[in-house]
């Protein structure tokens, strides 16, 4: 196989006889024929093929100022060209009616980008803290004799009861009185 033109469904084969290339054989799909200069003795037709999938298209661009090139580069999807804080992204590509490739560009200036990155870093650190730092939470409920502490988070099991009792003891010392108004639960 020498070449294949998927848009035209045109296959070009090199015919070899006794180790030497004797010519090219052009094969078209369907009922179409091609005037070949050699006859291999059989008719070869492509019967099934898959349309090619274009995975990447790059555009070689130049930025001009006063008719002078100030910046050159290649723009691909997710690889913009940045000039003076303006990022030029490739957003789309296709073929036009004449078969020429076309692509669309998006010019973007994002002065808030550092804030977005800072917020992402803070969010990541907060998620790590949730997993690696154990936190404790108590609720304070008023009663007729004072108030009652209710365990909300972190005071589970026997160890949690001991820690809650230690917290109550600290609060009773800070209270300065006899601590009869603080009751753990």
Image: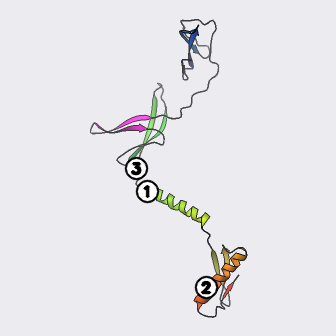
In percent of the image, x 53 and y 32: which residue is there?
54
Q: How is the image coloured?
A: rainbow
Contact (Cβ within 8 Å) of mark 2 with mark 3: no
Left or right relative to 161: residue 130? left
Locate residue 139, reporting x and y percent.
Answer: 64, 78
What's the mark number on residue 96?
none
Which residue carries the number 3 mark? 109
Residue at the image point whose x is 70% and y is 76% from the top: 159
Give the mark, 2 or 1, whose residue is nearer the N terminus.
1
Distance, label 3 to label 1, CA atoms, is 12 Å
Residue 132 image position (x, y, % from top left): 60, 65
Q: Magenta stretch containing residue 169, yes or no?
A: no
Residue at x 61% of width, y 85% of height: 170
* Residue 25, percent from left and from top: 56, 11
Instruction: Return the mark for residue 114.
Output: 1
Please state the extent of the stretch shown in magenta in the rendering.
Answer: 51-74
Q: Secondary structure at mark 3?
A: loop
Going from N to C along the chain, the mark reached first, 2 or 3, is 3
Q: CA distance from mark 2 to mark 3?
A: 55 Å
Mark 1 residue element:
helix
Q: How much space separates mark 2 and mark 1, taking CA atoms?
A: 44 Å
Q: Residue 90's quadrant in the figure?
A: top left
Q: Residue at x 26, y 39 (%)?
A: 66
Which mark is on residue 170?
2
Single out the mark in the foreground, 2 or 3: 2
How packed mark 2 is, by other alpha carbons closer than 10 Å (few <14, some 14-19, many 20 or more), is few
Determine whether 94 is above or below 182 in the image: above
Mark 1, residues whose alpha carbon is within 10 Å: few (<14), some, or many (≥20)? few
Q: Quadrant of the N terminus?
A: top right
View extreme (left): residue: 66
Place of residue 68 in the rendered image (x, y in percent of width and height, measured from the top left): 28, 37
């Amino acid at each position: 196989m020498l070449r294949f033109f998927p848009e035209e469904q045109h296959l070009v084969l090199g015919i070899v006889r006794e180790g030497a290339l004797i010519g090219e054989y052009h094969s078209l799909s369907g009922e179409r024929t091609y005037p070949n200069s050699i006859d291999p003795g059989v008719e070869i037709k492509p019967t099934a093929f898959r349309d090619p999938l274009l995975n990447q298209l790059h555009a070689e661009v130049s930025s001009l100022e006063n008719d002078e090139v100030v910046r050159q580069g290649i723009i691909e999807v997710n690889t913009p060209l940045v000039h003076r804080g303006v990022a030029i992204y490739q957003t789309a590509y296709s073929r036009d009616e004449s078969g020429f490739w076309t692509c669309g560009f998006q010019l973007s200036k994002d002065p808030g980008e550092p804030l977005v990155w800072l917020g992402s870093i803070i969010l990541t650190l907060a998620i790590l803290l949730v997993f690696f730092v154990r936190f404790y939470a108590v609720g304070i409920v008023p009663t007729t004799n004072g108030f009652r502490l209710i365990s909300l988070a972190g005071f589970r099991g026997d160890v949690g009861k001991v820690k809650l009792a230690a917290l109550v003891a600290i609060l009773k010392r800070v209270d300065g009185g006899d601590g009869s108004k603080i009751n753990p639960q």
